[in-house]
Image (spheres, rainbow, N blue to C red):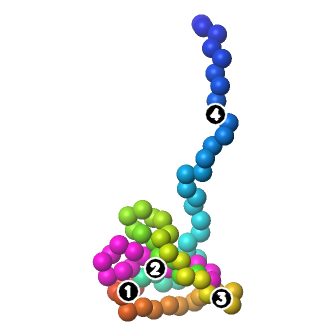
Amino acid sequence: MANTNLQFKTNYVVDSKIEPFYKGGKVQISKDENYIFCTCGTRVNVLEISTGKIVHSVEHEDQEDITSFASAVMMRCW
């Protein structure tokens, strides 16, 4: 066997992070079925269905959890 000195990379770059985006309750799907709207504590998150990534987030200012939300552009509720 050959004596091979292997060196492994020790520094890595973060490509993406997974963060909490939903804590329970109802979710709504956009009329074009491209986005999911859901609550997560003090935020309403908008996730792109095709990528699973949060594309927008609206946060409530007074630090109380959001328990419900509604919008005229949302069509389906589960």
Residue at figure coordinates x 68%, y 90% from the top left: 62
Q: Position of residue 71 (x, y in %)?
A: 42, 91
**Residue 4's spot in the image, x, y percent?**
63, 14
Q: Which residue is mark 1?
A: 74
Q: Amino acid at mark 1?
A: Met
Image-based side of 60 in relation to 76, left or right? right
Taking the view exactly as shown, the residue that stands out farthest to the left is 32
Q: Nearer the viewer, residue 56 or 33?
A: 56
3D distance between C-alphas at marks 4 and 3: 43 Å
Q: Residue at x 36, y 80 (%)?
A: 30
Q: Amino acid at mark 3?
A: Glu
Q: Residues within 10 Å of mark 2 (few under 14, many from 20)?
A: many
Which residues fall within the magenta stretch?
Answer: 29-42
What is the three-letter code of the residue carrying label 4? Lys
- The residue labelled by disc 4 is 9
Mark 4 and mark 2: span between their CA atoms? 39 Å
Observer-side mark, 3 or 2, equals 3
| Dot 2 amino acid type | Phe
Residue at 61% in and 87% down = 60
Question: Would you name the residue on which mark 3 appears?
Answer: 61
Q: Which mark is residue 37?
A: 2
**In x, y percent, where is residue 29?**
38, 79
Q: What's the residue at 58%, 58% (across, down)?
A: 17
Q: Nearer the viewer, residue 26 or 48?
A: 48
- Disc 3/disc 2 C-alpha distance (Å): 19 Å
Secondary structure category for the residue under label 3: loop
Which of disc 2 and disc 3 is earlier in sequence? 2
